[in-house]
Amino acid sequence: MAERKAAQRAALNALRRARRSAEKAGVSLSEWEGEFLESVSERVKTHGRAFGDPEKGAPGQALSMMQGRKLKEIAAKASGEPPKRRWGRKAPPKPEK
């Protein structure tokens, strides 16, 4: 039980940190990203975790794997990092001059 509470606190802190860092950096989050942060934090506060299907996340975790990935992407955007390529795709080769 203590592990679930700790995971819940960690998830809520990560969500708050992502929003605060975006605000401090002056990065505007898309409408979808703002709704995502709000809805996930609300579900974590209400239910203790943000997903219903136990197949989508590890036991005792507050966020599913995809929610964790999206949260990392939002935090990276807020810190000014360029977006990473998804799904293992490599960047196209640069043309030689």
Image: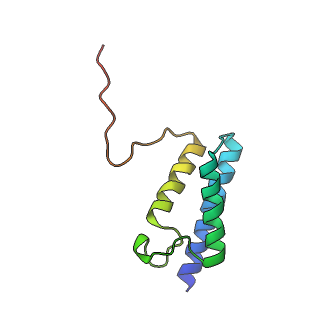
Nearest the viewer among 10 and 64 is 64
Q: What is the count of numbered marks?
A: 0
Q: Position of residue 86 (x, y in %)?
A: 38, 46
Position of the C terminus, as image quadrant, is top left
Determine the residue located farthest toward the bottom in the rendered image: 1
Determine the residue located farthest toward the top in the rendered image: 97
Q: Is residue 24 above or below residue 48?
A: above
Left or right of 48 in this view: 66: left
Which quarter of the picture shows residue 38?
bottom right
Q: Is residue 30 above or below residue 92?
A: below
Q: Position of residue 63 (x, y in %)?
A: 52, 68
Nearest the viewer among 18 and 50 is 50
Task: Please name the residue shown 61% across and 78% down the image.
Answer: 47
Left or right of 15 in this view: 86: left
Q: Is residue 16 above or below residue 89?
A: below
Q: Is residue 68 above or below residue 51?
A: above
Task: Please name the residue shown 64% across and 56% down the image.
Answer: 35
Q: Position of residue 69 (x, y in %)?
A: 47, 57
Q: Position of residue 72 (x, y in %)?
A: 51, 54
Task: Please name the residue shown 45% across and 60% down the image.
Answer: 66
Protein image colouring: rainbow
Position of the N terminus, as image quadrant, is bottom right
